[in-house]
């Protein structure tokens, strides 16, 4: 049976939280700025690509999806997540003997927001699309996503 959009995105979210977890471990237990920056870069790269797939491939797929209230909430949350992410990058670049407290504050904020965001996507948005999209459209959409993810 063809994988559902929900299954596919649950898997992608899992990878994303794995990368975020590595960054958390770096700042919580090791405190090395270079490694923290590097691990944050890996998360950020993945997160950016994930947002690209959600915004430019899935939400833009058709007007019906684009006009969903949930889609608008998701876009708004992406903007907020990106803003926090910029703050985190700024904090990791601050010079000093120890990592700044603000980095931990922002990292907590990002983690909490991302958990709530992903919950909305996994429990409402993607299950709705899985139910609502005609099989052939869903298949075409999944193929487009896979193509992008493989690059
Ligand atoms: Fe998202
Ligand atoms: Fe997502």
Image (cartoon, rainbow, N blue to C red):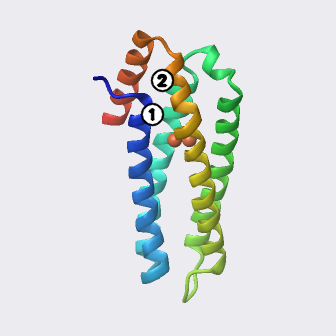
Q: Is the CB of mark 1 within 8 Å of ligand 2?
A: no
Residue at (43, 17) in percent of width and height = 138
Snapshot quadrant of residue 70: top right
Which numbered tag is attached to residue 130? 2
Residue 18 in the image: above or below residue 126: below
Q: Earlier in the sequence, mark 1 or mark 2?
A: 1
Which numbered tag is attached to residue 33? none
Contact, mark 1 vs mark 2 (Cβ under 8 Å): yes
**What's the CA distance linking mark 1 and mark 2?**
7 Å
User: What element does badge 1 sit on?
Assistant: helix
Q: Name the residue that disc number 1 marks.
A: 6
Image quadrant, ligand 1: top right
Q: Can residue 38 be seen in the rendering of this structure?
A: no
Picture coordinates of residue 89 (x, y %)?
57, 63
Picture coordinates of residue 67 (x, y %)?
69, 21
- Of 2 and 101, nearer the camera is 2
Residue at (43, 74) in percent of width and height = 25
Residue at (50, 15) in percent of width and height = 133
Say few, some or many: other residues with alpha carbon within 10 Å of mark 2 (under 14 / 14 to 19 / 20 or more).
some
């Amino acid at each position: 049976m063809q994988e559902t959009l929900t299954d596919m995105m649950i898997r992608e979210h899992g990878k994303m939280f794995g990368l975020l977890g590595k960054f958390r471990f770096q700042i919580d237990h090791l405190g090395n700025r270079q490694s923290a920056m590097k691990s944050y870069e890996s998360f950020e790269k993945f997160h950016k690509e994930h947002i690209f797939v959600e915004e430019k491939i899935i939400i833009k797929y058709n007007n019906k999806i684009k006009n969903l209230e949930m889609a608008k909430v998701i876009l708004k949350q992406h903007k907020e997540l990106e803003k926090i992410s910029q703050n985190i990058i700024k904090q990791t670049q601050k010079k000093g003997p120890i990592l700044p407290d603000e980095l931990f504050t922002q990292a907590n904020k990002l983690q909490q927001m991302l958990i709530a965001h992903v919950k909305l996507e996994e429990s409402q948005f993607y299950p709705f699309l899985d139910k609502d999209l005609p099989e052939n459209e869903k298949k075409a959409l999944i193929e487009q996503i896979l193509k992008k993810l493989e690059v």
